[in-house]
Amino acid sequence: MKVIERLTKLRRYVGAQEVKTKIKQLNLFPTIERGQLEEKYASLVKERLDFRAFLGFRLNKAEPIFRWFRFKEAFSQRLVEEILTSEWKFPLRNC
């Protein structure tokens, strides 16, 4: 009900045509194009459930400087290190 009330108030200040262009519906179902892209790049995509532990901010809480900034959509420094060493075989140097 609140959404309808907000739209009604918004229409008072802005023309009805302009309001229609600002409202977009989210696409919750995969599209044909997305399926085609997934098929095209399937050989490059690898699902790694062991990386799940490194997602999120909580591992950075113990790190200096990293704990100063909290981001909801963050990942830990350890995830980057794991990808570089295990996936790309990149040797890390201790700085």
Image (cartoon, rainbow, N blue to C red):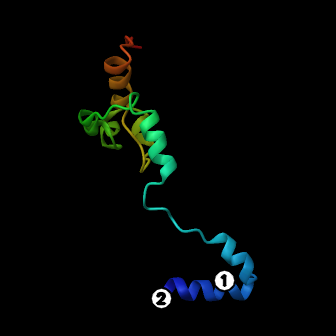
Residue shown at the point (43%, 34%) measured from the top left = 65
The x and y percentages for residue 59 are 30, 38
Q: Nearer the viewer, residue 17 or 62?
A: 17
Q: Using the rendered view, name the quadrant where residue 10 is placed.
A: bottom right
Q: Secondary structure at mark 1?
A: helix
The x and y percentages for residue 55 are 33, 40
Q: Which residue, given by chain and number where applicable, does mark 1 sit on?
A: 10
Q: Quadrant of the C terminus?
A: top left
Q: Is residue 73 left or right of residue 10?
A: left
Q: Using the rendered view, name the quadrant where residue 41 is placed.
A: top left
Residue shown at the point (73%, 84%) measured from the top left = 13
Residue shown at the point (38%, 20%) measured from the top left = 84
- In space, the residues marked 1 and 2 are separated at their CA atoms by 14 Å
Residue shown at the point (43%, 62%) measured from the top left = 28
Q: Amino acid at mark 2?
A: Met
The x and y percentages for residue 66 are 42, 36
Q: Which residue, given by chain and number where applicable, does mark 2 sit on?
A: 1
Placement of 11 over or under 28, stated as above or below? below
